[in-house]
Amino acid sequence: MHIDLSALSSNRVYHLMTQTIIPRPIAWVLSLNEDKSHNLAPFSYFNAVCSDPPLMMLSMGKKPDGSAKDTVTNLKVGAECIVHIAHAAQAEIVTRTAASMPYGDSEVTANNVVLTPQEDWPLPRIKDCPIAYYCKVHSIQELGNTPQQLVFVEALSLYVDDRAIQNTEENQQDGRMTIDALAVNPLARLGAAQYASLGKVFSKVRPD
């Protein structure tokens, strides 16, 4: 079947894209509300876009009333956030933090999410997440007819659960740390209400 996207409504295009661009990683983003409580929200229009500097992109729609998502509101003021990569076992709580709440109501408090502090960083990370990037805002743009808020963040440091580290840089000849993807087992987004875990992992060596 060949589908002419220009003939469809934006809503129908969205549903087709989210069911076919799969699986998508989920950025579980913690930011600081104006009252110093913590906002927590998942975004699956997300990926790495550059490694020098290490930049990630988050694309966020607006609220039904046309106002910015709380994460964008916070990042325009505070500039710092933590981008977590949740484990597949955290699917239920990740989904709960996607609920619409009044600005200032904390998803962390509402869902009893356990945080742990990091020295020399203004925000705590989620204790049970295997991966956490400590980020600052690089730039924020608007694009599209809706429009979407396109947020670029620069990662300044990275937390990796020790159980997911197979080899450290010190015992690798090429100086690269090796992460066990199955130990991370990241939660992935599919279409509608569907999620996925990592599943089978296999290797293929690229030709020179």
Image (spheres, helix red, strand yellow):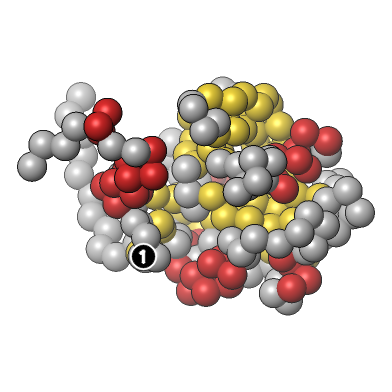
Q: Where does residue 158 sit, x and y in percent of width and height?
A: 64, 46
Q: Amino acid at mark 1?
A: Gln
Q: Is residue 82 left or right of residue 181?
A: right
Please name the residue that numbered disc 1 is placed on: 194
The C terminus - image quarter: top left
The N terminus - image quarter: top left
Q: Where does residue 27 sit, x and y in percent of width and height?
A: 55, 50
Label 1 packing within 10 angstroms: few (<14), some (14-19), many (20+): few
Q: Residue at x 11, y 36 (%)?
A: 2
Which of the pair 5/139 is nearer the observer?
Answer: 5
Query: Does residue 144 appear in this view?
Result: yes
Q: Where does residue 113 sit, x and y in percent of width and height?
A: 71, 72
Q: Residue at x 28, y 37 (%)?
A: 8
Query: Does residue 38 appear in this view?
Result: no
Which of the pair 185/2 is nearer the observer?
Answer: 2
Q: Using the rendered view, name the quadrant where residue 40 is placed.
A: bottom right
Which of the pair 97/147 is nearer the observer?
Answer: 147
Q: Is residue 124 left or right of residue 131?
A: right
Is 186 drawn above or below residue 120 in the view shown? below
Q: Is residue 187 left or right of residue 194?
A: right
Q: Is residue 183 left or right of residue 23?
A: right
